[in-house]
Image: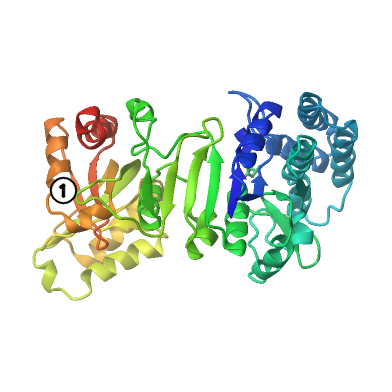
Amino acid sequence: MKVCKFGGSSVADAAQMLKVLEIVRSDPRRRVVVVSAPGKRRKGDDKVTDLLISCAADALAGRDPAENVGRVVARYESIRADLGLDEALVEGVRAELLRRLAGPRDHEGAFFDAVKALGEEESARFCAAAFTARGLRSVYVDPREAGMLMSDEFGAAQLLPESYARIRAKLAPVPEVVVFPGFYGYTRSGRLATFSRGGSDITGAILAAALGADVYENFTDVDAVYPVDPRLCPEAVGGEGIREMTYAEMRELSYAGFAVFHEEAVLPAIRAKIPINIRNTNRPDEPGTMVLPTRSSVPGRVNGIASTGGFGALFVEKWLMNREVGYVAKLLGILASEGVSIECMPAGVDSVTVVFRDAQFPDDVRERVFARIDAELSPDRVSYTRGIAFLVAVGEGMRTTVGTCLHVVSALSKAGINLQMINQGSSELSIMFGIREEDLQPAVRALYAEFFGKENK
Ligand code: ASP
């Protein structure tokens, strides 16, 4: 069986919800459907979750929330009218929203969660009603009834592990298609608690794991995950997406700002070794991207290239550094005491470079760190360089191939890009290349052409 999750753009209006219906109907293995709240219908439009947060903020600040309440109700009314559903559904939205806005305020986070989760709940109720009206036997299931127990960290709650068995016991026997709201569950004391923003992905992954699904389908509005960031390399949009990647490749790619999804969001599915299929609601015939525990990799093949700027490099040189036991440990200790978290550390015989996000190193921190390095480590030379970007070439096939690095380096050199650092992780799944931030776009485009461009097909 398949668990499918549909994001905000997939349920943004009636037409989108009907696409969801057709997708679910077209494959009888699609037994569980998790939905987000209606998202943006076009650029500049509102997301229902944001409108709900504004309602809650109005109420807490003593402002009249009527205008924002009206906007939320209007979104559902237009969906209702276009789908020809019962008017009572929209009256239900208004009444429930007002009830929650008048609810307990002893805990601000709990108050916000109760209000902002209504978007998912109503989205699921509307989808179940629309599916049933069009002949697909489906039923709305409430997370409380399903036994989704959450920690009481409101706004960023976590699922309590005993929930898995409860969810399975509740959902597995349901004969209809289950329509389930994403994003929230209930604490032991019965209060609604949400995951962090974007948390419907987590709900989908949890249900897939609980039910031992054959695949977790995550429907969004892109055909596939692109091998490079399309904002830096627009030509990637017209090209092929990544067909398959492993969990480990996804982790390496998303580490450097790659737009897959938040690995933490799909961790429950990964732990249960359930394949994840990223697909497009608007183009359901596209196979999308499969994220798998393992795959048969093509030797030498780079599967994707992540790219991100905003790094700085601290360089420390000391003649005969390699003979001084604990030198690097002391340096890292100084950085740790300032709360600087480190990305990588290319080292030479007498020098070491520590790379971290530049935002962690404002002038006052830098001055303190430099003063301590001078006093405690007596270096020959210390410098700090901002404006560093990283390209990370990722591919399982690199492990078994000699020369991938050469391939990248020669493509960059042809494009006239100066390499400042190279770092191959011990996983041999990725190689990081440090360049200047201003070279990021030309570098990504050069590597896209080299590894994924038309002449490579
Ligand atoms: N609607 C929620 C949000 O906007 C959760 C989700 O869509 O995943 O964050």
User: Left or right: 130 with respect to 303?
Assistant: right
Residue type at mark 1: give it.
Cys
Tell me which corner region of the image, top left, top right, bottom left or bottom right, holds residue 88.
top right
Residue depicted at x 60% and y 38% = 23
Would you place residue 246 above or below residue 5 in this image? below
Would you place residue 30 above or below residue 238 in this image? below
The number of numbered discs placed on residues in the rendered structure image is 1
> Quick one: SS at disc 1?
helix
What quarter of the picture does the C terminus occupy?
A: top left
What quarter of the picture does the N terminus occupy?
A: bottom right
Q: Nearer the viewer, residue 305 or 400?
A: 400
Q: Quadrant of ligand 1?
A: top right
Dot 1 corresponds to which residue? 405
User: Left or right: 149 with respect to 345?
Assistant: right
Residue 424 rendering spot, x and y as whole percentages: 21, 56
User: Left or right: 333 with respect to 21?
Assistant: left
Tell me which corner region of the image, top left, top right, bottom left or bottom right, holds residue 423.
bottom left
Residue 302 rendering spot, x and y as whole percentages: 25, 46
Q: Determine crowd level at label 1: few under 14, some 14-19, many 20+ residues with C-alpha closer than 10 A.
A: some
Residue depicted at x 64% and y 63% = 159
Residue 205 rendering spot, x and y as whole percentages: 57, 55
Would you place residue 188 above or below residue 243 in this image? below
User: Left or right: 272 with respect to 121?
Assistant: left
